[in-house]
């Protein structure tokens, strides 16, 4: 199969038929063999009924329905597990991503040998204050920390090699950082293509301002896990050593002060160790150092190796 198109969606019943008709038109014109995997992330409208109708009319359209809302990352991860195309295209269901971009994205993967091609919505129709400005700050931070020179990490329109999507996990809200995850998985040829951004025709955006706060937290998590999951003591050991060093220095200062006081003939009772701020600095730093060694990295490793992290309850499947 040439192409798998994965469409995560939430309450998008009005846009599904125009989207699938548009995708079919592009595929037929270019003689691609294809499948469209629509992942319903717990919609409360009639999205699933529409998917069932569309899949009966076109066997290339397949559906997966979550019992409840898990988020876009979960929908993409399940879509990646089920897809079989040589090239995997992801796009949003709101008609803001254009299927007309698919042939060029396919060529960049198959002919130019990119591992991943991310869309860049250079001209956007979103609110500047609510989306554009925060998005620019978010992308600039991600570029600086990851070293990947993309303008729009969060663009839903992306193309992947089949091997890439079968080699990575996407969970939590990590869909924004799939290029970063791919890079750390060893897929280094990551490109970018300017794509057309469409105005939303139906419904409203499903993403609020909290996505930017969560986005930065997810970025920190990815950068940490990518760099230190196999060598956690390089991180925790360094911080723990710094804390212990501060504690030891504070203890030495405390001891020297005590010796100086005794040497000058002062009464030891007038200079109790617990009266010095260095005592509490030393104690706090030693405790923090121990916690960094024992608590922090153990919790991270346990969370990283959780067997149920990517278990999602699928209520129904169509055409699988």
Image (spheres, grey):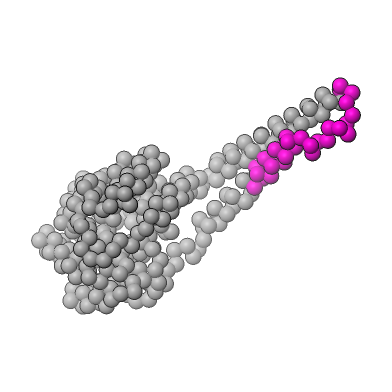
The quadrant of the image that shows the C terminus is bottom left
Return the residue nearer the eye: 154 or 163.
154
Residue 312 image position (x, y, % from top left): 42, 68
Q: Quadrant of residue 190?
A: top left
Residue 84 image position (x, y, % from top left): 28, 63
Examine the residues drawn in magenta and state their main secondary structure. helix
Residue 206 image position (x, y, % from top left): 33, 62
Provide the residue span drawn in magenta: 263-291
Residue at left 62%, top 51%? 295
271 is within the stretch colored magenta: yes
Query: In this image, 316 relative to 256: left or right?
Result: left
Residue at left 71%, top 33%? 250
The quadrant of the image that shows the N terminus is bottom left
Residue 41: in sight, yes or no? yes
Residue 196 image position (x, y, % from top left): 18, 52
Return the residue nearer the eye: 137 or 305.
137
């Amino acid at each position: 199969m040439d192409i798998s198109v994965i469409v995560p969606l939430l309450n998008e019943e009005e846009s599904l038929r125009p989207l699938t008709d548009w995708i079919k038109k592009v595929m037929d014109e270019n003689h691609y063999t294809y499948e469209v995997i629509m992942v319903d992330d717990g919609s409360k409208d009639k999205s699933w009924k529409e998917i069932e109708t569309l899949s009966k009319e076109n066997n290339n359209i397949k559906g997966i329905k979550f019992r409840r809302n898990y988020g876009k990352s979960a929908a993409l991860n399940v879509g990646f597990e089920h897809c079989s195309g040589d090239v995997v295209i992801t796009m949003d269901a709101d008609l803001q991503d254009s299927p007309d971009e698919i042939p060029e994205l396919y060529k960049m993967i198959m002919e130019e040998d990119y591992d991943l091609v991310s869309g860049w919505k250079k001209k956007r129709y979103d609110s500047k204050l609510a989306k554009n400005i925060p998005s620019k700050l978010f992308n600039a931070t991600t570029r600086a920390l990851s070293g990947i020179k993309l303008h729009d990490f969060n663009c839903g329109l992306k193309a992947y090699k089949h091997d890439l999507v079968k080699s990575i996990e996407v969970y939590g809200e990590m869909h924004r950082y799939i290029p970063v995850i791919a890079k750390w998985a060893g897929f280094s040829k990551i490109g970018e293509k300017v794509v057309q951004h469409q105005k939303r025709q139906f419904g409203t955006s499903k993403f609020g301002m909290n996505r930017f706060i969560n986005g930065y937290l997810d970025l920190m998590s990815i950068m940490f896990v990518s760099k230190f999951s196999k060598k956690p003591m390089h991180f925790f050991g360094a911080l723990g050593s710094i804390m212990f060093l501060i504690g030891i220095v504070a203890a030495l200062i405390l001891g020297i002060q005590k010796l100086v006081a005794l040497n000058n003939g002062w009464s030891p009772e007038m200079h109790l160790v617990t009266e010095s701020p260095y005592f509490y600095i030393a104690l706090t730093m030693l405790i923090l150092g121990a916690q960094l060694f024992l608590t922090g990295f153990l919790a991270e490793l346990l969370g990283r190796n959780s067997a149920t992290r990517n278990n999602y309850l699928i209520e129904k499947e169509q055409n699988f």
